[in-house]
Image: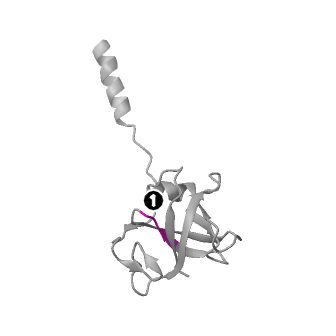
Amino acid sequence: MKHAIAFLSVLALGACATAPEDPAPQITALDPTETVEGGTGAGLPDGEGRFMGFTVASLGDAATPGLWIETPLVTSEQPGRVVSENGMQLFLTLRPSGGARNSGSRLSLQAFQELGIPLTALPTVTVISDA
């Protein structure tokens, strides 16, 4: 009887499966030896996007989902990307913060996680507009 129960348990658990995950956002490692117009750091491929500037990013509102950065480097919401200090590039939504141009930015929780940045860090990121 013990063997029958064990056998049925194995069969029942064999039908269990994990739920499929959402597709991961596009992340690309860039060559950190290339230069970006206006400074050094991760490279911007020729003809792709517009360099907006560098900004120090803190963690934004964790209750607001998605991939976004609130930054004073843009005046309207638009598609774009950020390149982190570790060379990772992430496509996200650029949102205006309304702050002074030299003030910092707020990066979404999901963006911090996808870029592999510790949540307590204040990384400098390169902001690129794809609009």
Name the residue: 63% across, 72% down: 102
Residue 130, position as x, y percentages in the image? 52, 80
* Figure quadrant of the C terminus: bottom right
Nearest to the observer: residue 51 or residue 33: 33
Residue 65, position as x, y percentages in the image? 60, 56
Callout 1 secondary element: helix
Categorize mark 1 by other alpha carbons within 10 Å: few (<14), some (14-19), many (20+). Answer: some
In the rendered image, the residue lying farthest to the top is 1
Name the residue: 44% across, 55% down: 116
The region drawn magenta spans: 81-85
Taking the image as shown, residue 16 lies to the left or right of residue 62, namely left
Q: How is the image coloured?
A: one colour
Residue 66 in view = no
Tell me the quarter of the picture where residue 45 sits. bottom left
Is residue 66 placed above or below 54 in the rendered structure? above
The three-letter code of the residue at mark 1 reads Leu
* Figure quadrant of the N terminus: top left
Question: Is 52 inside the magenta-drawn segment?
Answer: no
Nearest to the observer: residue 114 or residue 119: 119
Residue 58, position as x, y percentages in the image? 58, 58
Is residue 56 placed above or below 19 in the rendered structure? below
According to the image, label 1 marks what residue? Answer: 115
In the rendered image, the residue lying farthest to the bottom is 47
Name the residue: 34% across, 18% down: 5
Nearest to the observer: residue 96 or residue 72: 72
Magenta stretch secondary structure, dominant: strand
Is residue 61 placed above or below 6 in the rendered structure? below
Taking the image as shown, residue 55 lies to the left or right of residue 3, namely right
